[in-house]
Structures are given as C-alpha cells and as structure tokens.
Image: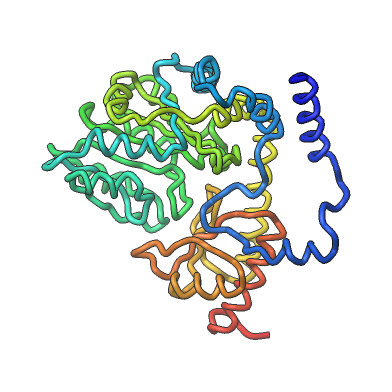
C-alpha cells in the first residue's frame, strides 16, 4: 500500500512539472498576477530541484523520526563537494546560524572584528550585542572590499574579519587572487570568515572565485554556503560551514542543531541535480544582463553585479523609492546606509524584472532623473 502511495505521489509531482496547460482560469490569472512582486530578499524566483521535491515526498513517511543516516549522507555529499573530510563540515538551518555561532564564539569585551560598510549585518549585530567592537571599513570607489584598509585596521585585539564575497548589498567581488593573498597575510590567531552565499552566480562561478582552497590549507579560515540562493531552497532553511575541525569545535559550543529531515534529504538530492543548479545559475545571469542592459539605456549607474541582485544608484532616497515601488505592488530591498540613494533589487523572473524596470523608468521620469519623452 505504501509503495502504491509513493508511486502516486511521484506521478503527481512529475505530472505537475510536465503539464503545460494553464493551471488557472482567465479570471484567476488576473488574481494571481495581482500578488506583489517580491524582489527584496534575494530569493530564487526560478524554483528548486524537482529531484528535491521527490526526495521530500518519499521521506514524509519517516517524519516521525529524527534524521539518522540522512544527515550523515548529506555531510558526506558536502564533504565530497568541498574535497574535505566530513569533520570539516557543519550543517545548519540556513547559513545564518554559522554567522551567529561565529559571533557568539569570538565576541567578547575588549575584542574587535573588522568588516565593511555597507555590508551584511547578521554577524556584526550579534558580535556587538555580545560585547565586542565592530570596526567598519568603507568600501572603495568601486564599492568593493578595501583590502588594504581592512589590513590596516587589524590590531592586537582583532579576533575576526568578515568578508561577504560577493558583498551584500553591493553585489561586488574582490579579485580572488588579491583576496587569497589578503587571507594568507592575516595573523593566524585571527579568524577570516568568507561568506560565499552568492558566489555561484559571479563571473567564473565557484571554480574561479571560491576560497575553499585556502580553507583546506588553513586553520583560521571559515567559509559559509547556503542552499537559499542558486539552489532555490530559501524556505527549506539549509546551509553549512566549512573549516578546520578546531574552528568548528568553537562554533559547536553554540550549535542549536541540524536542519529537519525534509530539508536534509532535499539538499542531498539538489546537490546531485547539477543540471537544475546550472539552469538556475544561467537564468540568474541571463535576466541580470537584461536588467543591466536596460539600466545602461536609461543612463543609470550601478555597481558591478556579481550576485543575485543589482545595486542601483537611483538618486532617490531608498526609503522613498521603496514606498513608491510598494504602491505599485513591487517590493524592493531595504536602504543600505550610508549609500542612502542606492537601491538593492533582487533578480526575479524576466517578466517580473520587466515590470520592475517599467515602473522604475516611470518613477525616474516623474522625479526628473531622466528626460521626459
């Protein structure tokens, strides 16, 4: 009986993926399209692996049990991906817990960490709340990490350096050769945390840009990855950290547990479905190019986009632009002080981005930022 049910579930999933006829009536289509366009949280609009969906459905009958072999299988798959042993991997519900554990493990009164502004703040806020000091280094003129300035900020009380690569919210990349040299120059007692949430969609992808090679040869480098971006699994909450076991031992003091069973099997299946991951990456790059081409036509300045979003110099207060877009049912990213007239816009589907671009052009004309036809 269970086998028949699983076959039925499998058939329904595959059928829904292959069925090309409209799923709604014409009246319902208008209702569906009235939903807001969410291009604010850097979610993946292209969807996650069909194999991951099947894996979750097949695991539902085991939902009354904790993950056992499933968790070990995921760790082994991740270790194979990163070419490290299993004790170098720590799996978490999203990559956020890796950032939080690093803050909890390294922050204390009298100690400091170094990062950039604007940058991603999940780690820094908790580091400060824990009693540590955060030294914020401005980005350089290209809105990239200023590595020489970060190097100069290191002192005897520095315990951690956080680099989001590509940076959030600017989407810019540090040259990987320069970043590697920087990491290798940092004192061994300072942890270098490289957050690679978006690196798959950067020019050259993982192969060119990842610092995993430095991680393998170091005892003071921590790398985090997520399944929320190119894998399209933000709602399933799964990520991981990669580091020497001595670093992970410090983090494990604050470990709150692994992802649930369904997320675990979904992630393992998604890792194996490289065709879907490649498709998502290609779509990100293709639609991102459509956006930047249109911005070029409008004469707009933007940071070199290497992530799943574009950071645009609009000349309009970011909070005001958010409100104007929300009035048009388009939700864009939060303000990014001190760059208060720049806006971070996540990459959605081509249709969503065309709607955004049309609304954006209309707002720019209303505010005299571009000429009126």
The answer to which quarter of the image holds residue 227 is top right
In the rendered view of the protein, which quadrant contains the C terminus? bottom right
Residue 134 rendering spot, x and y as whole percentages: 22, 48
Q: Is residue 327 left or right of residue 192?
A: right
Observer able to see residue 117: yes
Q: Nearer the viewer, residue 341 or 273?
A: 273
Instruction: Using the image, determine if residue 13 lies above or below residue 307.
Output: above
Residue 235 rendering spot, x and y as whole percentages: 55, 43
Observer able to see residue 203: no
Q: Is residue 53 left or right of residue 143?
A: right
In the rendered view of the protein, which quadrant contains the N terminus? top right
Q: Residue at x 54, y 43 (%)?
A: 234
Residue 111 rendering spot, x and y as whole percentages: 15, 40
Q: Residue at x 37, y 24 (%)?
A: 243
Q: Residue at x 12, y 37 (%)?
A: 156
Instruction: Using the image, determine if residue 315 lies above or below residue 20.
Output: below
Residue 142 rendering spot, x and y as whole percentages: 42, 56
The answer to which quarter of the image holds residue 162 is top left
Taking the view exactly as shown, the residue that stands out farthest to the right is 21
The answer to which quarter of the image holds residue 358 is bottom right
């Amino acid at each position: 009986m269970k086998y028949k049910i699983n076959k039925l579930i499998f058939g329904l999933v595959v059928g829904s993926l292959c069925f090309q006829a409209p799923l709604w009536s014409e009246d319902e289509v208008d209702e569906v399209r009235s939903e807001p366009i969410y291009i604010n949280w850097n979610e993946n609009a292209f969807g996650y692996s069909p194999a991951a969906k099947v894996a979750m459905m097949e695991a539902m009958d085991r939902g009354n049990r904790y993950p056992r072999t499933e968790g070990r299988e995921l760790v082994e798959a991740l270790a194979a991906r990163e070419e490290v042993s299993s004790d170098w991997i720590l799996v978490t519900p999203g990559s956020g817990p890796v950032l939080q554990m690093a803050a909890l493990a390294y922050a204390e009164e009298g100690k400091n960490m170094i990062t950039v502004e604007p940058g991603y703040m999940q780690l820094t806020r908790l580091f400060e709340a824990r009693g540590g000091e955060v030294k914020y280094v401005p980005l350089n003129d290209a809105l990239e990490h200023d590595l020489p300035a970060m190097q100069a900020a290191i002192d005897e009380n520095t315990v951690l350096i956080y680099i989001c690569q590509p940076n959030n919210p600017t989407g810019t990349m540090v040259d990987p050769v320069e970043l590697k040299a920087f990491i290798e120059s940092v004192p061994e007692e300072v942890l270098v945390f490289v957050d690679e949430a978006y690196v798959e969609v950067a020019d050259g992808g993982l192969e060119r840009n990842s610092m995993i090679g430095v991680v393998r040869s170091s005892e003071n480098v921590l790398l985090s990855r997520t399944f929320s971006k190119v894998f399209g699994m933000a709602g399933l909450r799964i990520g991981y950290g990669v580091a020497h076991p001595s670093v992970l031992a410090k983090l494990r003091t604050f470990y709150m547990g692994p992802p649930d069973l369904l997320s675990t099997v979904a992630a393992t299946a998604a890792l194996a479905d490289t065709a879907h991951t490649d498709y998502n990456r290609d779509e990100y790059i293709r639609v991102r190019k459509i956006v930047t081409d249109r911005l070029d036509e409008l004469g707009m300045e933007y940071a070199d986009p290497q992530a799943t979003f574009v950071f645009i110099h609009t000349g309009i207060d970011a909070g005001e632009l958010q409100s104007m877009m929300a009035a048009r049912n388009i939700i864009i990213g939060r303000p990014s002080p001190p760059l208060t007239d720049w806006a971070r816009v996540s990459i959605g589907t081509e249709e969503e981005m065309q709607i955004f671009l049309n609304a954006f052009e209309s707002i720019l004309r209303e505010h005299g930022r571009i000429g009126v036809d």
